[in-house]
Amino acid sequence: MKTRRNFIKSSAFGAMGVITTSACSSEKNNPPRATENLVRKPTVISTWNHGMQSNEASWKIIESNGTALDAVESGVRVVESDPTGHSVGIGGAPDRDGKVTLDACIMNHQNKCGAVAFLENIENPVTVARKVMEETPHVMLVGEGAYRFAREQGIPHQNLLTAESEKMWKEWLKTSQYEPEINVENHDTIGALALDRFGNLAGACTTSGMAYKMRGRVGDSPIIGAGLFVDNEVGAACATGLGEAIVRVAGSAVAVELMRAGKSPQDACEEVINRIMEKHDDLENIQVGLLALDKFGNVGAHSIYENFNYALTRQDRHELVDSPFKISY
Ligand code: GLY
């Protein structure tokens, strides 16, 4: 969708002060570029239209002096719990066996991270990912083990296949053509990045993955370095689109490393998209979108095809922005 909406200057977004502290630890190892905006601007950025509702929840946390970690978790939970979306959480498109399986990860400013994959019957996988990070010595739990862990943590069992998504799956069964499309509804994964008032970054990424995927298929979203990466000394990045293409180049980690090497968030995203395009002979069914946020709150986005958009929220703005892209439809 090519809309550009602006919900600027509502009082809900007007109360933030800018941060000029230097909370990040080792700036001497990563000196700011001369042209960079050196004021740390609390910022939330997330993928697609549904990022608007995610950012709204995230911003409430940032605005009340909460952490970036709480902000991204609270934001993406809203999208996970929305049964009308068919790409994340409850109501997500099932695999070809009719089972909804969810993937998610989360990462904080100390390079701590948690992830779940192939998780069934739990509405908010991002919260389970956070519990993996905080309550276990591990980074990732999958399938039955992830489900059992979630239940042990007091998270309720929930049927995730809504009547609507079941109807769509039954329609798909008539042909059972295994050519799952990505981004057909102008949104898929939600990836969210935040910079809080203390100068700390965090990110989260959550999805039901490719519609009607092979049972057991996992994409980029729960893979630290592919769907999400955060390094508080530099910046953060997240990805959306065809997970296989993103994993092949470690998309989010590479975007952060490019920022470390001096690229702006915008140039880093474009470079990752270039790299994905170079590595694939046939781009016909490969859409990928990248978002990046540096430690000062500067943002970037790029995608292979048009129609990728993202929600951007700061002190004075809350808007949906169209991403630059390489190829028009
Ligand atoms: N980016 C979501 C997936 O490929 O599963």
Image: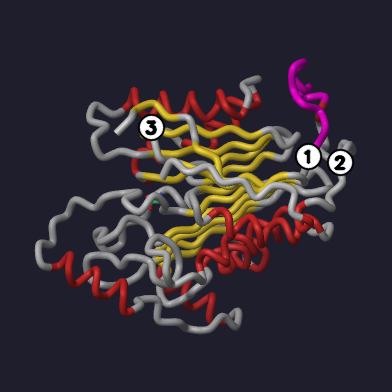
Q: For label 3, count other residues whose C-alpha is less than 10 Å away and answer few (under 14), some (14-19) or many (20+).
A: many
- The kind of secondary structure element at disc 1 is loop
Which span is picked out in magenta? 28-40
Q: Are marks 2 and 1 in contact (CB under 8 Å)?
A: yes
The quadrant in which the N terminus is found is top left
**How far apart are the two marked residues, 3 and 1, measured between alpha carbons?**
28 Å
Taking 137 as reference, is 269 left or right?
left
- For disc 1, does the CB lie below 8 Å from ligand 1? no
* Amino acid type shown at disc 1: Lys
Relative image position of residue 137 (x, y in whole percent): 63, 62
Q: Which residue is mark 1?
A: 41
Ligand 1 near label 2 (Cβ, under 8 Å)?
no
Identify residue type, mark 2. Answer: Ile
What residue do we see at 81% from left, 38% from top? 24
Please name the residue that numbered disc 3 is placed on: 304
Q: Is 262 rendered above or below residue 190?
A: above
